[in-house]
Image: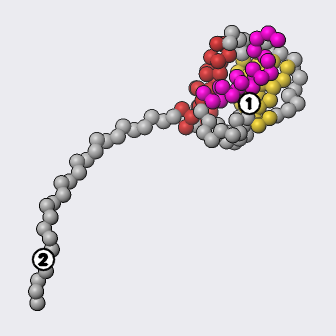
Amino acid sequence: MSETQEPVTAAEPKAEPKAAKKPKKEAIEDKPFGEFVHDHFLPALAKAFAEREYQDLELSFANNQLTGKWDDGQKQFTLYFPDGDIQGRKAFSESTNGVPASTIEPFLIDERKVSLDLLVFGVIQRINAQKWFGRN
């Protein structure tokens, strides 16, 4: 019987261990819903209104609904989060002169990933569409 020899190859150098990756900073949108709304969304929305010189904005958040009132309560909007999640379903309503909202509309339904900036932009855009910013 003849013996077969396997080709001899040089040992491959061992790969050096990669430096440990820094833990990825948690996105603020990944925080618990209530914490996100109270710590980030409400202040960002108040700032956006202040930049448009509306200082009397009153924001409240309860039962997964964010309500904003200004102009001595004459203008109001409500942003609904029925799933208790910014990535879930959202709806929007607005009203004037203390009259209850007659229509609740879907809000940001085509967005795959909702961010803080997008939520603020969406609210400002909806209110601007009502011509509630500035003089008409």
What is the quadrant of the C terminus in the image? top right
Residue lying at the far bottom of the rendered structure: 1
Q: Is residue 132 magenta?
A: yes
Going by the numbered disc 2, the residue's amino acid type is: Gln
Q: Is residue 72 magenta?
A: no
Q: Is residue 81 visible?
A: no
Q: Quadrant of residue 70?
A: top right
Q: Which residue is mark 1?
A: 79
Tell me residue 21's x, y (percent).
35, 40
Q: Which residue is mark 2?
A: 5
Marks 1 and 2 sit apart, C-alpha to C-alpha, by: 76 Å
What is the quadrant of the N terminus in the image? bottom left
Q: Quadrant of residue 105?
A: top right
Q: Is residue 54 above or below residue 92?
A: above
Q: Is residue 14 left or right of residue 90?
A: left
Q: Magenta: predominant secondary structure element? A: helix
Disc 2, SS: loop
Tell me residue 30's x, y (percent).
55, 37
Tell me residue 126's x, y (percent).
75, 25
Residue at the spot 13% in from the left edge and 80% down from the top edge? 4
Disc 1, SS: strand
Q: What is the span of residues highlighted in magenta in the rendered image?
A: 117-136
Tell me residue 59's x, y (percent).
70, 21
Q: Is residue 84 above or below residue 71?
A: below
Nearer to the camera, 11 or 50: 11
Q: Which mark sits nearer the N-terminus, 1 or 2? A: 2
How many neighbours does mark 2 have within 10 angstroms: few (below 14), some (14-19), or many (20 or more)? few
